[in-house]
Amino acid sequence: MSERTVYIALGSNLGDRRGNIENALAALAAEQVEIVQRSSLYETAPRDVLDQPWFLNMVAECRTRDFPLQLLARLLRIERELGRDRSGASIPRGPRKIDLDILLFGDAVIAMPRLIVPHPRMLERRFVLEPLAEIAPDLRHPVSRELLASALDKVRDQKIEKLAED
């Protein structure tokens, strides 16, 4: 399989949030997932489960030779190795050390029990669209063909703050 461009969302709201994201990026690179570019970090209010710490979020443009389910398996393994608890004891969409989501996998549209791409909730989430538009302003949603930067206008009411670069 040739290399594909994929966009991965990274988020953390427990412990050393910045360190968790940096460790995840390093783990991706060690797994032959090339980081082409990365967005700024954004601090974002929690969604769904509101009684939890704010998140740090970012999006990375990557290149991989993996098939979609291979990449998903890598991401899940990296999450586990970095302390993500996906057991029944954890709260779905609750606090987590690290969260890695495949947003886009080339132009592929994937609907499998374990993986849906494009990410089914990406157009509802400013913490995904803002960093994605920062690094890929001309990117279009593979299904709706909507410019992702334009989709951002519909979620401007969600709280998010771009962090200053160190």
Image (cartoon, rainbow, N blue to C red):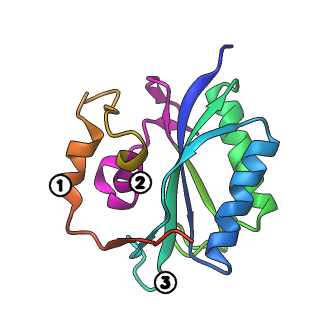
Image height check: is 9 above or below 157?
Answer: above
Q: Is residue 52 left or right of residue 18?
A: left
Q: Amino acid at mark 2?
A: Pro
**Residue that numbered label 1 is attached to:** 154
Report, in whole angstroms, how far the alpha carbon at label 1 lies from the one at label 2.
Answer: 15 Å
Q: Earlier in the sequence, mark 1 or mark 2?
A: 2
Image depth: mark 1 or mark 2 in front: 2
Q: Position of residue 47 (x, y in %)?
A: 38, 71
Across and down, in percent, residue 121 comes to 37, 50
Foreground of the two, 73 or 44: 44
Of the two numbered discs 3 and 1 on the same chain, state the one appearing first in sequence: 3
What secondary structure is marked by label 2? helix
For the residues marked 3 and 1, what is the alpha-carbon distance in whole angstroms? Answer: 24 Å
Residue at label 2?
131
Image quarter of the N terminus:
top right
Question: What residue is rendered at 47% in x and 79% in y?
Answer: 54
Secondary structure beneath label 3: loop
In the image, 7 versus 87, the foreground residue is 7
* Horizontal side, residue 8 vs residue 133: left or right: right
State the extent of the magenta-drawn residues as a range. Answer: 103-132
User: Does residue 29 show up magenta in the picture?
Assistant: no
- Where is residue 105 shown, x and y percent of the image? 52, 30
The disc labelled 3 sits on which kind of residue?
Gln
Residue under label 3, please give it.
52
Residue 79 x, y percent position in the rendering = 71, 58
Task: Work out whether 142 lies above or below 54.
Answer: above
Tell me the SS state at disc 1. helix
Quadrant of the image occupied by residue 109? top left
Question: Is residue 108 shown in magenta?
Answer: yes
Q: Residue at x 29, y 54 (%)?
A: 124
Dot 3 and dot 1 residues touching (CB under 8 Å):
no
Q: Along the horizontal axis of the image, is 3 left or right of 137?
A: right
